[in-house]
Image (cartoon, rainbow, N blue to C red):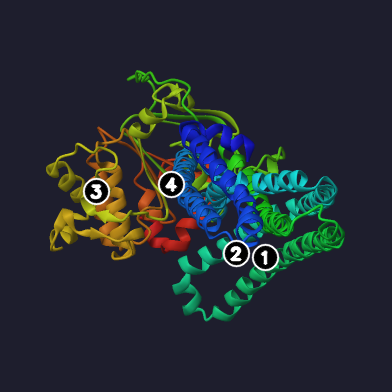
Amino acid sequence: MRRLLQQFLGPYTSKAILGVLTKMVEVVFEVLTPLVVARMIDYGVHAHDITAVSRLGFLLLLFAVVSYSFTLICQKCASLCSQGIGTDIRKALYEHISQFSSAEVDFFGSASLVTRITNDVNQVQLAVALGVRQVTRWPLLAIGSIIACLSIDVQLGLVVLVSTVLVGLIFYLVMHASIPFYKKMQDKLDSVSQITQEALSGVRVIRALRKDAYEFKRFSAASHEQAQVAISVGKLSSLLNPATFFVLYLAILVVLWIAQDLVLSATLTQGQVIAFVSYMTTTLISVGYLANLIIIFLRASASSMRIHEVLQTPLTVTSHTDTPIKLDANAPALTFENVSFSYTDAAQQSAAALQNLSFALQPGQSLGIIGGTGSGKSSVAQLLPRLYDATSGSIKLFGTDIQAYPLQQLHKLVGYVPQKPSLMRGTIRSNLLWRNPAATDTQLWDTLAVAQAKDFVEQMPGQLDSVVEAGGKNFSGGQCQRLTIARSLVDTPRLLVLDDAASALDYATDAQLRTALTELQEQVTRIIISQRVSAVMDASLILVLDHGCVAGLGTHDELMQTCTIYQEICLSQFSQEEVQQ
């Protein structure tokens, strides 16, 4: 928590200090109030002096008005600090997470990241607000009350002081035992969020396969585990209030027992006893609130550690320079030199998704990548825009290693279309303008035509301004894929990577798309990943992968002669006569 505040409290320091100072003023008036009441009893009520009662009553009213005014100022400062710091933390988290490579996202999990940027930040916000408003109030009120007790009678004041030390010891023991549970509770909340996210995103599949009961059991089990941790924390917390109240009530009994002799001997007045009991009650209330504050701060401490963990995670995919790289017109468009890649840190070659991959592709050529499920096709695609970095080897784009390019220039050179199309809430136009916000309507319609999306967009009432719901839910799978392809073609990338991006298209539309892309070959080098032989057979070069290794590399005719795996794939999709043709 301390490190997080050091990072984000700076702009709000003056407001926090002002809030603390105004709260201190409020505490001063609140501590003085029982003394005024004591004087009212001793010099007004006891002496039947209505003037003294009125005068001291007016003074109490003045105390209340001034105290309330300073309370409003403190509340305002606390709100500005907590909301401002919370907003800044969310912005910093979102900015940092948006720069994560897929490796960092895989490490944390999207559900955990969502929980940290929402629930965990809320916990920190609450702690900051209460820190400004209450952390100063209750300790100072307790200390002020103890000092006032000592000023009334030292012997009775020592009883209060000893009881406060015992309460502090109870706080420490409970706090020390509770901290690990709050961290574990937030982790369990991540699991609940993950299951919820999966269930909501796959609700159609769950209902279609009648797995509602199964998913409910998963959710119930995760919720039960989270509840058990919360109950364990609750059991510890439940010890806090009874133990502290027992100590303080016992102290009040001791004080009253001692005070009776002092009153009888006229050492203490009735008003002083009432003031003393009032201060004891104030101390009691202060301790009770401190107990609740400690619980809140323990949760905020666990949340702050989770937030700090994300903010301190180094970025593995970064730009080493901001200076654009000049392209070598005579170099191959793309070169893989002994590239290996693993999704984990495992050193074993058997764990690698890709092993010793080497090939070269000239500008304007096309590379088709085909292979069985899990052969590493998508891994190749994700290395090119640096969603991941290769574990070993070198990937060169126009003669320069892709890690030497500024990320902005690399993403301008590489147009990437993933397996699962992703459209954002907005309009068709707003989605297409991602690569080039300055693109004209003519350019957008041209890219839609190449992607075979122009016809259905023209038929929509709003055309380019037609609404796109979150995730493109108001479009079919094939329409989403075509819009995603069109988006990648805006601003004409030098390398276009289609990772099974036409899987939802019918064969006729797929053929038209491939024909349209072929017409761009002078401008765009293409990598087409597909399970369909028809999608890759006309490529300049075909790469056949098998469990991350190169099983074949060549043209369609060459692979039909030399690569058994390619032959098997072809025969699984075409008859013997069609293959021979």
Residue at screen point 23% across, 47% down: 516
Q: Nearer the viewer, residue 544 or 404?
A: 404
CB under 8 Å between callouts 4 and 2? Answer: no
Callout 1: SS: helix
Q: Which residue is mark 4?
A: 76
Q: Cα distance, mark 1 to mark 2?
A: 8 Å
Upstream in the sequence, badge 4 or badge 2? 4
Badge number at residue 226? 1
Of labels 1 and 2, the one closer to you? 1
Of labels 4 and 2, the one closer to you? 4
Upstream in the sequence, badge 1 or badge 3? 1
Badge number at residue 578? none
Q: Amino acid at mark 3?
A: Ser
Upstream in the sequence, badge 3 or badge 2? 2
Q: Amino acid at mark 2?
A: Val
Upstream in the sequence, badge 1 or badge 2? 2
Q: Which residue is mark 2?
A: 192
CB under 8 Å between callouts 1 and 3? Answer: no
Q: Residues within 10 Å of mark 2 (few under 14, many from 20)?
A: many
CB under 8 Å between callouts 1 and 2? Answer: yes
Residue 236 x/y as whole percent: 78, 61
Q: Quadrant of residue 342?
A: top right
> Eyeballing the image, is 264 above or below 154?
below
Q: Cα distance, mark 3 to mark 2?
A: 34 Å
Residue 44 x/y as whole percent: 60, 58
Q: Nearer the viewer, residue 424 or 280?
A: 280
Q: Number of labelled discs? A: 4
Q: Is residue 12 left or right of residue 146?
A: left
